Image (cartoon, coloured by chain):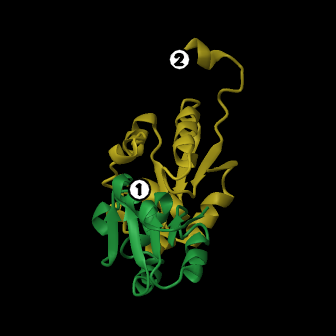
Amino acid sequence: MSDMDDMDDGSGIVKKFMFLNRKAPHGTVYALEGLEVVLITAAFDQDVSMVFTDDGVYQLLKGIDTKGIEVKDFSKTYRALDGYDIEKLYVDQASLDARGLAEDDLIVDVTVLSVDEMANLMAEQDVVISF
Amino acid sequence: MLHIVNKSATDRGSLESCLAMATKGSAVLLIEDAVYAATTGGAAAAKIQAAAADLKIYALGPDLAARGMAARVLDGVNVVDYAGFVDLVAEHKSCQSWL
């Protein structure tokens, strides 16, 4: 156990954080900024879930090539999340269906949930942060 | 006239407003998040294909590629690069950007 862990500074408190991603990548800065905040939160050893609904499901598509628009391709970062102990990735089934997408089109392994399951997951969180 | 749409059709109503106002023979260029509408399987695909009967529909290739959508473009949609974007603006008497 490190000295940090011994200090009585509340660092032992673990809250359930949900990061709700509802925007397509690149058109706005929300997707990239959300990803940055998730990585920061992971450094504090919190219970992090990432949820992708509505246009947010587009963030996880395979085959993204941003060279032509000269912006960073952050889609690879989603594959590095498990290295930060962020393994709870949830995708809304109805959002995939509405966009003609399937789980196999996504760059990472996810858990696909129905709207009811997603609602229950959201209800049990301590903190929900929306991007 | 050239209509330019840059918002996702599943997030905003700008594509729908554009298609309602675009007259026969006009051109519609989809850029940024609007390019999702020009791809197969989505909610806007049928609207785009119906619109393509009366309008010329274009989508910006670099924006499709950046969104992993380059291989999913609907039949009847013309993919253009940045030079093609400039040509479209130059060819049309007026432009309307549906921000």
Q: In the rendered image, what is the letter of the chain coloured green?
A: B
Labelled disc at residue B86: 1
Question: SS of the residue at dot 1?
Answer: helix
Q: Which residue is mark 2?
A: A1
Q: Position of residue B47 (x, y in %)?
A: 47, 82
Instruction: Mark yes or no: residue A34 visible.
Output: yes
Amino acid at the residue labelled 2? Met
Q: Position of residue A68 (x, y in %)?
A: 34, 47
Respond whether the residues carrying marks 1 and 2 are from the same subunit.
no
Q: Position of residue B39 (x, y in %)?
A: 38, 71
Viewed as shown, does residue A74 lie left or right of A13? Answer: left
Which quarter of the figure is the C terminus of chain B placed in?
bottom right
A68 up-or-down from B43: above or below: above
Question: SS of the residue at dot 2?
Answer: loop
Q: Residue at x 36, y 68 (%)?
A: A102
The picture's colour for chain A is yellow
Q: Position of residue B84 (x, y in %)?
A: 35, 59
Q: Nearer the viewer, residue B48 or A39?
A: B48
Amino acid at the residue labelled 1? Val
Mark 2 Cα-neighbour bin, 10 Å: few <14, some 14–19, many ≥20: few
Q: Nearer the viewer, residue A78 or B70?
A: B70
Labelled disc at residue A55: none
